[in-house]
Amino acid sequence: MSPFSSAYTPLCIALIVALGTKSVVSQNFKATFGSSPAPFKIDVEPAFIKETVLKASLTRYAVDLDEPDLLDGPPRHNVTTVRDYWVNQYDWFDVQDQLNQRYEHFTTTVTLEPNPNYTDPVPLHFVHHRSNRTDAIPLLFLHGWPGSFMEVDNILDGLLNPPDPSSPAFHVVAPSIPGFAFSPAPKKPGFALREAANTFHSLMQQLNYTQYVVQGGDFGGSILRVMAGDYPSSVVSMLSNFWLSPPNDTDILRYQEGLTTTDENTTIQNLNTFGTQFSGYRLEMETQPLQVAIAMTDSPLGNAMWNYNLMIHLVDQYEWTPEQIITWSMMYYIQGPYGAMRIYKETLEEGLGFSGFGLGTGSPYVDQPVAISEFLADFWFGTPLDWARRGGNVVVRNVHNSGGHFAALESPDLLLDDIRAFWGNATLSNVGVFAKG
């Protein structure tokens, strides 16, 4: 029988079965989540992969208008290129083998500290690599949407084993936000950025990292700010490549009167352009995430293009390959994208959403030392130091005239330079506490 036979019965939807202290989670991949960290290998159900390829092959295309590419979304030639590669060349099981060989994967279950919004235990997937250096610093790497733990790939070796022994080395922990990749999505409402912060802090405690530093972008850049406020004795310092500090009313008035600086003009124009032209995805996921998730859960190409439409706009001449586009989308499609979409709505309701492209009223001022790294194609590029300091103790501002939103992927050397300069200065970044310990 052909693997694309219509007689094939689709896999059942997620099922959680309690087995003592563990849970076996079937969301089209095999995994167990115990009460402590255990090794994990990615193992996606072959029947699901066959069904996915079949659905990709049956993609129905929208009819393009005679207009510039990307004005309304990915043009048809982008969609057909990805579809044809998916059907004729893409091999998920080769990708799966590479991911298993590249990373040390683990699963666990964490129990959140008392929280009125979400009380269930949280099953979690994470990558954990320890440096051979005895003076290595624990570093929590946090991704966002539409990324995943894979964003750490191009900086991982440089973090673990820097070529210069005088540069800091790190033990690296890169978790998947619940609902992303292989961390199962929450089954109840109430899980937003504060709950994610609680989850990742609990994970670091489970790994015996009582104190640690944090690096992140996108949602990761928001989560680390919450972590700093909620766990000040554990979060030593942080480097963010997504530090939103939007203009206030006075800044806007100065802008209208032509009194703002070049950096201020750049920031306001970038935020305005992104907000009016490229952020429809965010508004949909903040309001009716299930509506769009119904379509994306059923269409692998639709899901991939939904993600790609943001990916293509936030890079600096970076060429996404069909293989990357598909693999990044699979980090959502395998378990279904609804959980990763819904966190936008939960976050907005929690008061931590991107209202006006700044964090909501629930975001704390960060007292710990902060370094920020701005990359040219990201929509917060140009944010002045005095604006950045409204949200925290920003002691370093790095400005790069290249790169974009996915800094660890697109500009790993620049990001590593920033990381080494900041955490290589023990006084500035406060990492001297690790030597004392």
Image (tube, rainbow, N blue to C red):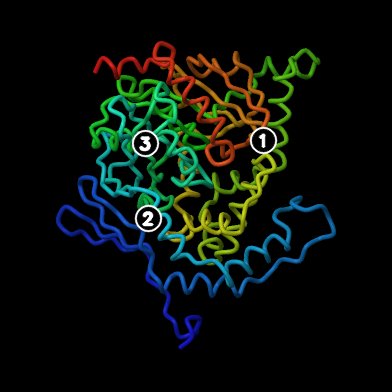
Which residue appears at 57% of the width and 30% of the height? 414
Quadrant of image for the N terminus: bottom left
Which amino acid type is shown beneath numbered disc 1? Ala
The residue tagged with tag 2: helix, strand or loop? helix
The residue tagged with tag 3: helix, strand or loop? strand
Which amino acid type is shown beneath numbered disc 2? Asn
**Label pair 1/2, CB-CB below 8 angstroms:** no
Report which residue position mark 3 lands on: 172
Quadrant position of residue 432 = top left
Please provide percent x and percent y for residue 289.
52, 52
Which residue appears at 46% of the width and 70% of the height? 49
Please provide percent x and percent y for residue 304.
58, 58
Mark 1 or 3, nearer chain start = 3
C-alpha separation, residue under disc 1 versus residue under disc 2: 31 Å
Give the answer, above or below, for where 33 lies relative to 177.
Answer: below
Number of disc labels? 3
Which residue appears at 60% of the width and 13% of the height? 386
C-alpha separation, residue under disc 1 versus residue under disc 3: 26 Å
Which amino acid type is shown beneath numbered disc 3? Val
Foreground mark, 1 or 3, reads 3
Foreground mark, 1 or 2, reads 2
Mark 2 or 3, nearer chain start = 2
Mark 1 or 2, nearer chain start = 2
Compare residues 398 and 13 and report the one nearer the observer: 398
Quadrant position of residue 32 = bottom left
Report which residue position mark 1 lands on: 377
Please provide percent x and percent y for residue 431.
36, 18
The residue tagged with tag 1: helix, strand or loop? loop
Which residue appears at 35% of the width and 45% of the height? 126
Report which residue position mark 2 lands on: 100
Give the answer, above or below, for where 387 lies relative to 311.
Answer: above
C-alpha separation, residue under disc 2 versus residue under disc 3: 16 Å
